Image (tube, helix red, strand yellow):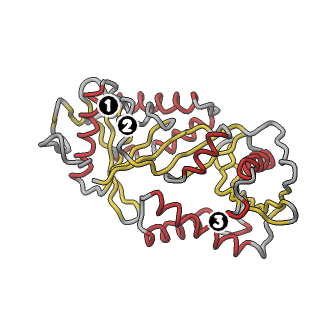
Amino acid sequence: MNGTSGTSGISGTGTTSGIRVVPDQGEWRAGFEERVLAGYRAAGCSEPLSRALLERALKGVDGWTVATDGAGWIAVGVSEDNGATVGRIHDLTATEPDAATAARTWAERWCAERGAERVEVRLAGGTGGAGGAGAAGLFDGYRVRGQNRLRAAAEHPALPPGLTVRPLTAEEYPGWYAGEEAAYVADIVRAGALTPEQAKAKSDEDFARHLPQGHATPGHAFYALEADGQVIGTGWVNHGYLPGVTFGFSLEVYEEHRGKGYGRAAMSVGEWAARQGGDGALMFNVFGGNEVAMSLYDRTGFAVLDEFRSLPL
């Protein structure tokens, strides 16, 4: 799709197809916040977690541009991301197909006129609604870049039979780190968002931010998963990442041990780890293109909190 097709003459303050930028965001913002909260509550999030996720969704809101066609809202913005100018459709509430298509086209043009190389959208629950798409299927032409997944941990999760878990040692950490970084870079590139060079730079930045003290970083736990006397995988979690939530940065089963049921077992390890850290839910991010992981999360009951999609302009 070309972000400059389908309409003309759109500017930051102009109107096209009845769409106009509004100077006062108050009315829109109240409704936006309520829609976002409703979406997270419907996904089973606690009130503290819903509000923490809302705070993340509102990052940079004062710099967004809000427009209306008189019936629905559009919120857009442009920012720098790893050296690229990226446009974002933060909200689009139109539900009538023609109006929704016109709003999306307006948003794409608005972003393109400001130098955006691609436009991104967050779909609440993976399908639309609060903070994301309006009409169903409106963003089907956008490529899936990633998802946030969440499920409540079992009250008393037990480790799967035949699988033992122990802390990863400081001596094992450098080798684990090198493998994790390589896998992370490959995931980013496969998702199609960045070049290998950009992905490596992002990886360096992200690991430095999340693990400033390496193996000793507070709140982070590292595990080795063993079966039949062999290390068959590893785990990395961050307790208290959000209220009541442990974030699973990685639950990895080594390739030579896949296809033996250990993937599902690793999910149980994640629940166990969440409870060990005093949290009641486990959250993951999965990159677009990783169909194996998405299928596993579907089978193990991890709901889609957010889905992120993008389109080159």
**Residue 110 screen position, x and y as percent:** 24, 46
Q: Is residue 253 left or right of residue 45?
A: right
Residue under the image location 44 percent in, 33 percent down: 128
Name the disc covering residue 174, or none: none
Check whether the beta carbons of the residues at disc 1 and disc 2 lie within 8 A of each other: yes
Residue under the image location 16 percent in, 42 percent down: 10
Name the disc covering residue 91, or none: 2
Mark 2 belongs to which amino acid?
Answer: Asp
Check whether the beta carbons of the residues at disc 3 and disc 2 lie within 8 A of each other: no
**Residue 281 screen position, x and y as percent:** 70, 41
Q: Secondary structure at mark 1?
A: strand
The crowd level at tag 2 (other Cα within 10 Å; few <14, some 14-19, many 20+) is: many
Residue under the image location 73 percent in, 72 percent down: 173
Check whether the beta carbons of the residues at disc 3 and disc 1 lie within 8 A of each other: no
Quarter-of-image position of residue 305: top right
Name the disc covering residue 73, or none: 1
* Alpha carbons under labels 3 and 1: distance apart: 39 Å
- 240 or 24, which is in the foreground? 240
- 130 or 96, which is in the foreground? 96
Residue under the image location 82 percent in, 61 percent down: 226
Mark 1 belongs to which amino acid?
Answer: Trp
- 122 or 268, which is in the foreground? 268
Of marks 3 and 2, which one's residue comes earlier in the chain? 2
Which residue, given by chain and number where applicable, does mark 3 sit on? Answer: 211
Mark 3 belongs to which amino acid?
Answer: Leu
**Residue 4 screen position, x and y as percent:** 19, 48
Of marks 3 and 1, which one's residue comes earlier in the chain? 1
Q: Is residue 101 left or right of residue 232?
A: left
Q: Is residue 309 left or right of residue 217?
A: left
* Alpha carbons under labels 1 and 2: distance apart: 7 Å
- The tally of labels here is 3
For residue 89, above or below residue 289: above
